[in-house]
Image (cartoon, helix red, strand yellow):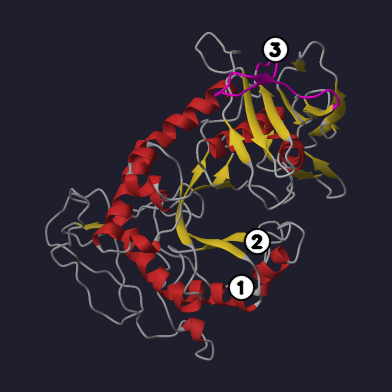
Amino acid sequence: MNEPGVWTKFPAGGVKTRNREAGVTQVSSKPVSVRFVRLLMTAGSGDCSGSANDVRNCVGYAIRELYIGFKKTNSTFYDLIHHSRSRSQATMYVSSTDPWHRSTDRDVDLEQPGFDQLFQSSLTRNLPVLVPVPVLYDVPENAAAEVRYLRTRGYRIEGIEMGEEPNGQYIEGDDYGALYVQWCAAIRSADENARIGGPSLSGLEEDDLSWMRTFINYLEERGRLSDYHFFSFEWYPFGNANSSSGSGLVHGRTALENALIPIRQDERLRKLPWLMTEYGYSASGGPAQVKITSAIFNTETVAHFLLLGGEATYLYGYEPQRLTGDPSRGWDTHMILQVSENQTDLYQLASYHAAQLMTTEWAQPTDQPHELQETISDITDKNGDQLVSGYAVHRPDKKWAILLINKDPRKAWQTRVLFRDTLTGRERGFQEGSDLYQFSSAEYSWLDSGSHSHPRRSRPAKHSLWEPKDGCCVRLPPLSISVVRGQLTE
């Protein structure tokens, strides 16, 4: 592929044939040195691979096997492709997969639930849902059909997220922009007021953001920025989750702040709502995913992202799952609910309890505005990273609640909570009898037992009434999440 990303046709690379039988096509009379070979198919043969009664046998493209190599003077063909039924075969990338699914192909362990099952369950809590629409492996007509079906059923839609991680799918940002425009037109035919965005960017590294700028430039140059209503991305900042000690948690806040700097600097993205549509300690598995480490990371990620101006976060891994992994790495999975190996027991993991604490005790479980306030913590490590972080919210019920996160894996901290009026300098604290909720190793621990690993102890956050002594203090256990909620002193 020549710079900057231009495919060069072989001297005899243009082939026009309707022959579906195997054969050898010579694309050059002289040897050509290449790194990648692309086979671009633009028209079907018109033949049917099976019964002509099923239209699926007669449309699209299919390649059974591909051989690429050269001939010597003895006419012997030397194949450079390694053929295997395992992953050791030569690497190939395809733009689409076979859409033909039969009832016998259904995998009960992998298939996604249908929209009806999702919307009619209690999972949505009767709130509008952000729904996905595939782009790279689908067609605009399907996107329109999906939206039309959801609207016809009367389901409440928060928005439509187009695509998932396209920047990691070997497509340039401007090419994706061309598809985005086509999909928008199709979706508008089903819902002219649809809120559309995406692209569920796979990260916020420089390569990801460069791709994103190319995509945005394409829309802007064609006057189509008005079709782009929100920016979504995924957030997995740690390379692996093998350490469950919590030593990396102190860097989570700073990592997110720094990653969002380029987004703020781009005026087009700064003005848009930001959605974190996947997040977790790491994209790879490891012990941290099932221990309290992940719960603390998730909690601070959500609170800090909202404080930084984010509109919403969406957790990945709602559905109950079995453990995945292997003994050498440790058994793990991205989940908040674990199903036992024989599917008879259901365990609530640390991230489940943390999510409940955030959404029912810190925030008020109602679809009304909450006011977040910045906090200052002087409990830091030697590098200035916060060991204890606080997030204050003024709830619709007029109560204040503060979320306190101790990321120190070894030490409990005594923390004094004060609210200071920046205009008058007046300081107030919580009244006696305020609610105190705490979640730590006293409520949750993990039993490492190979494929039979599961929580040894799994309880919700402990509730008590806070009785401060001289306005002090809240004791924060190591690696813990606490919420204090109540009225402030007069």
Q: In which quarter of the image is residue 119?
A: bottom right
Q: What element carries label 2?
A: loop
Tell me if residue 161 is in the magenta stretch.
no
Tell me if residue 420 is in the magenta stretch.
yes
Residue 326 makes an appearance in the image? no
Give the residue at the far bottom of this rendering.
53
On the image, the x and y values in percent for residue 366 come to: 72, 51
Give the residue at the far front of this rendering.
424
Where is 21 relative to 181, above or below? Answer: below
Mark 1 to mark 3 CA distance (whole Å): 50 Å
Q: Name which of mark 3 and mark 2 comes first in the sequence.
A: 2
Marks 1 and 3 in Cβ contact (< 8 Å): no
Which residue is label 1 attached to?
150
Residue type marked 1: Leu
- For mark 1, does the 10 Å Cα neighbourhood hold few (<14), some (14 to 19), or many (20 or more) residues? some
If the image is split into quadrants, where does the C terminus sit? Answer: top right
On the image, the x and y values in percent for residue 170 come to: 36, 52
- For mark 2, does the 10 Å Cα neighbourhood hold few (<14), some (14 to 19), or many (20 or more) residues? few
Where is 433 relative to 469, above or below? Answer: below
Which label belongs to residue 410? 3
Nearer to me, 35 or 443:
443
Residue type marked 2: Gln
Q: Magenta segment range?
A: 408-433
Which label belongs to residue 112? 2
Q: Name which of mark 1 and mark 2 comes first in the sequence.
A: 2
Mark 1 to mark 2 CA distance (whole Å): 16 Å
On the image, the x and y values in percent for residue 344 come to: 87, 49
